[in-house]
Amino acid sequence: MDSRYHNSGTALPMDAVKALLMLRSEMAQRETRMSTSFNEQVQSLRQEVNQFRQDVTGIVNGAGARIAHDARAAVTPVAAEYGRAVSATSAHLQGASRTVWLWFGAAASILVLVLLVGWAVLGYYRRELAAVQQTLNRYEDAVPVVRAYVASDAVLCGERICVNVDPNGQRTGDQHQYREAKPRPDPP
């Protein structure tokens, strides 16, 4: 028989204490690795958000779908990696004390918080994109007026437009009260 089992009953508790200390040390190391991994992933997510903000300024058509895709692409790998880390840690710590379960709950809460923040950022950029789209539509509506002004022999007279009327020009309006302006002369 093994001599450590015959020594006045103290060797077995010392082995148990050593095993518990090793388990505690391993749990602390895993916690540190998980914390470091999570911080790196949060920093990576922040960098992705900054890149995302820069990309949004150049988007005009179809940007809503692209923003949704980019946001999902930025959040999905972080969530998947974090999910795998949580699952692996949970498998190693089954049967451990209540503290382990509290850490698992905190990690799940942080994941939900990251997802909520990502969703809020997505909503913000969708609203910003809608405002930019409305501004673009106003500018596009003004383009035909500016083209007509440039093509006509017209100048600004205070807050009105003065035109050089073409006497042979086409008439328009409900009562044919408007007459076409002469074309702008070519610069010398």
Image (cartoon, helix red, strand yellow):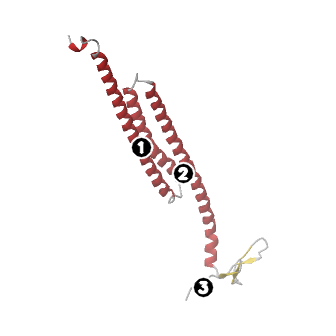
Question: Foreground mark, 3 or 1?
Answer: 1
Residue 186 higher or lower than 1, as above or below: below
Q: Residues within 10 Å of mark 1 (few under 14, many from 20)?
A: few
N-term mark: 2 or 3: 2
Q: Which of the two discs, 3 and 1, labels the residue nearer the N terminus?
A: 1
Distance from label 2 to label 3 (Cα)? 45 Å
Taking depth in this image into account, of 97 and 170 the one nearest to the observer is 97
Q: In the image, what residue type sits under mark 1?
A: Asn
As drawn, is 153 to the left or to the right of 71? right
Q: Position of residue 183 (x, y in %)?
A: 63, 81
User: Marks 3/1: CA distance?
Assistant: 67 Å
Badge number at residue 64: 2
Query: How far across and down, in percent of the image, does residue 72 sit?
Result: 48, 44
At label 3, which amino acid type do we have? Pro
* Mark 3 secondary-structure assignment: loop
Residues 155 and 181: in front is 155
Q: Give coordinates of residue 144: x percent, y percent.
A: 62, 70
Rate crowding at label 2 as few (under 14), some (14 to 19) or many (20 or more) other CA atoms within 10 Å. some
User: Which residue in the structure is indicated by mark 3?
Assistant: 185
